[in-house]
Amino acid sequence: MRTHAAIPLVIWLAVAPLQLASSKGVVAVGAEVGVASGAAPADRVADVTAGWQVAPDDHIAGLSDAKTLSNPAFVDYDDLLRATPEMKRLRKDGIDPNSAEGIQLTTAGQSRVQRACQSAMNSDGYCSIWQAISHSDGRSVADATATAKRAL
């Protein structure tokens, strides 16, 4: 009688949402399903992860937990910041951004952008506003820059 060596087999299903962080702080949210056996190379292991891909530092307004997002939008943050009266004054008067006055103006401009994004989020029905956001399934994300700029 011939015997065969047992091959370890692992099957997993993560029903709860899965969060993964990369070295850049990117978070992927979704579910993971996979099968692995002792004989299969690592690149043959099934890894299915779906969901919103965001960096926590890119959050501006609204929901900040990627697992809870339903209708997020993004804005061109640098464009909005440049359009604030504070940043226009900084450039016009040649104020050093690293000086005490420059830091105060920059902080005031950032606060103004955040309030404008909150207003755009509320008026257009978004759940959150981000500087950068994408979805693993490739769906498009609304651009709320124009609405936020009007709120400045």
Image (spheres, grey):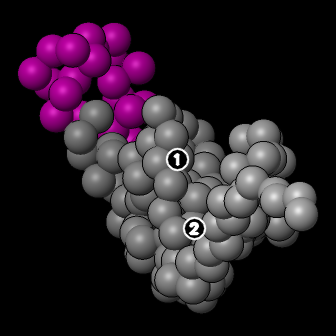
- Looking at the rendering, the stretch of residues picked out in magenta corresponds to 83-105
Image quarter (top left, top right, bottom left or bottom right) of the N terminus: bottom right
Res. 95 in view? yes
**Residue 54 picture location, percent across and down:** 55, 55
- Alpha-carbon neighbours of circle 1 within 10 Å: few (<14), some, or many (≥20)? some
| Residue located at (42% from left, 72% from top) | 65
**Residue 132 picture location, percent across and down:** 60, 50
The amino acid sitting under disc 2 is Val
Q: In which quarter of the image is residue 53?
A: bottom right
Secondary element type, mark 2: strand
Whether 99 is among the magenta residues is: yes
Q: Which of 18 and 61 is in front in this view?
A: 18
Secondary element type, mark 1: loop
Q: Nearer the viewer, residue 28 or 120?
A: 28
Residue that mark 1 sits on: 26
Res. 128 in view? no
Q: In which quarter of the image is residue 106?
A: top left
Q: Main secondary structure of the magenta part?
A: helix
Residue that mark 2 sits on: 29
**Residue 78 picture location, percent across and down:** 53, 37
All told, the count of numbered labels is: 2
**Residue 130 picture location, percent across and down:** 53, 58
| Residue located at (36% from left, 66% from top) | 115
The amino acid sitting under disc 1 is Val
